[in-house]
């Protein structure tokens, strides 16, 4: 097998750079359970200010961030309205039901964006006959729609409906910096429209571990206790937080390079198999290729043998995600090997 893989399965496969490794090795640390890790504390303060919220909390993963948020914002038996293909619905192994004991009410959307009128109808009125709708969850960028970005006006409209109906809003912003770079909208503007927000350092930002929650001080105080309940309170975690801080300092603006490479990849895949990619739908760093009658496992397997790792997301669907460890040559190689794989399928 080749030693020089082109890794396109996910931006979670990024490796820490030499500079990031040095920052982690040199981190000033303390016991974060006691609130005494200076590197974590500094990162949390920096992120809270960046997002315009009162406080922030470092957690181990995006899934933990989402599930701590849901548990913090709901009571057992509540209902959570959410987009039907959200990460929380598809990829968090029924955690809302098992950890928070809440029901999810999934709604259809337009590329991840909920319709305010449909949301208003879905929020149940307060009555002893129904579950209490207490939370609305949204996702930006929307992974299942190819990294699509919520327009700020759409987020405002949905949040307005939710708040008028007595619900709070949580934003799964795993790739919120991709949304910000693609749209030119500051992360603080997205955050201003929601009560709580989570985002990942371990995707396009290139850190090996870590996510963050932001919100009010009261929310973060409750989230800290729930994080501990779930086993997520860590000790000298500054060695991890230093990598996240390095990512925030060095790897945000360069996300634009990933977006450009995703557009080039989409163009190349569409050239090799016309109609497989809607190039206009590639807004950030995720590309889906619909193979029609071709088998995604077979095509991805052929590419794997040629040194390109791409993800079979469905029976006839491939997903590719660009990131800082894939350069222009890697994109061209992926296009070449995709063309060979579909020709031989």
Image: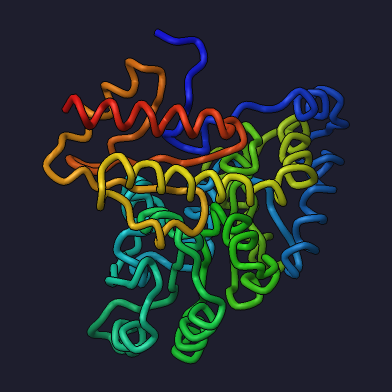
Report the residue that reaches farthest toward the front.
271
Q: Residue at x 48, y 45 (%)?
A: 264
* 114 or 89: nearer the viewer: 114
Residue 228 falls in which quadrant of the image? top right
Q: Please state the horizontal and vertical placement of residue 250, each as a whole percent of the image.
A: 77, 42
Q: How is the image coloured?
A: rainbow
For residue 315, say whether it is visible: yes
* 307 or 104: nearer the viewer: 307
Q: Residue at x 11, y 42 (%)?
A: 293
Q: Please state the horizontal and vertical placement of residue 70, each as a whole percent of the image.
A: 47, 61
> What is the total number of numbered labels drawn onto the structure image?
0
Query: Compared to 42, does 335 lie above or below?
Result: above
* Quarter of the picture holding the N terminus: top left
Query: Compared to 315, does 342 lie above or below?
Result: above
* Quarter of the picture holding the C terminus: top left
For residue 78, say whether it is visible: no
Q: Please state the horizontal and vertical placement of residue 211, each as a whole percent of the image.
A: 62, 46
* 128 or 45: nearer the viewer: 45
Q: Residue at x 71, y 33 (%)?
A: 240
Residue 303 falls in which quadrant of the image? top left
Q: Please state the horizontal and vertical placement of residue 295, each as a whole percent of the image.
A: 16, 34
Q: Residue at x 15, y 37 (%)?
A: 294
* 199 or 317: nearer the viewer: 317
């Amino acid at each position: 097998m080749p030693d020089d893989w082109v890794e396109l399965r996910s931006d979670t496969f990024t490796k820490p750079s030499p500079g990031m490794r040095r920052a982690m090795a040199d981190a000033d640390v303390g016991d974060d359970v006691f609130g005494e890790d200076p590197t974590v504390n500094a990162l949390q303060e920096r992120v809270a200010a960046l997002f315009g919220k009162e406080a922030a909390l470092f957690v181990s993963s995006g899934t933990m961030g989402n599930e701590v948020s849901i548990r913090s914002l709901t009571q057992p038996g509540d209902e959570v309205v959410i987009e039907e293909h959200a990460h929380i619905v598809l990829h968090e192994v029924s955690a809302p039901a098992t950890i928070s004991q809440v029901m999810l009410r999934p709604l259809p959307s337009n590329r991840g964006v909920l319709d305010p009128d449909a949301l208003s109808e879905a929020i149940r009125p307060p009555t002893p006959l129904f579950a209490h709708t207490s939370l609305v969850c949204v996702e930006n960028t929307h992974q299942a729609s190819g990294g699509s970005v919520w327009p700020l006006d759409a987020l405002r409209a949905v949040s307005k409906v939710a708040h008028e109906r007595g619900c709070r809003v949580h934003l799964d912003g795993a790739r919120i910096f991709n949304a910000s770079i693609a749209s030119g909208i500051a992360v603080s503007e997205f955050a201003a429209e929601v009560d709580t927000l989570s985002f990942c350092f371990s995707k396009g930002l290139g850190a090996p571990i870590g996510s963050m929650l932001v919100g009010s001080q009261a929310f973060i105080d409750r989230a800290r206790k729930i994080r501990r309940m779930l086993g997520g309170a860590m000790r000298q975690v500054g060695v991890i937080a230093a990598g996240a801080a390095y990512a925030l300092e060095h790897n945000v603006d360069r996300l634009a390079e990933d977006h450009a490479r995703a557009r080039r990849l989409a163009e190349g895949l569409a050239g090799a198999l016309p109609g497989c990619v809607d190039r206009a739908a590639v807004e950030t760093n995720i590309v889906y290729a619909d193979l029609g009658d071709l088998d995604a496992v077979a095509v991805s397997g052929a590419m794997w043998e040629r040194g390109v790792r791409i993800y079979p997301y469905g029976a006839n669907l491939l997903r590719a995600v660009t990131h800082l460890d894939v350069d222009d040559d890697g994109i061209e190689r992926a296009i070449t090997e995709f063309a060979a794989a579909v020709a031989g399928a």
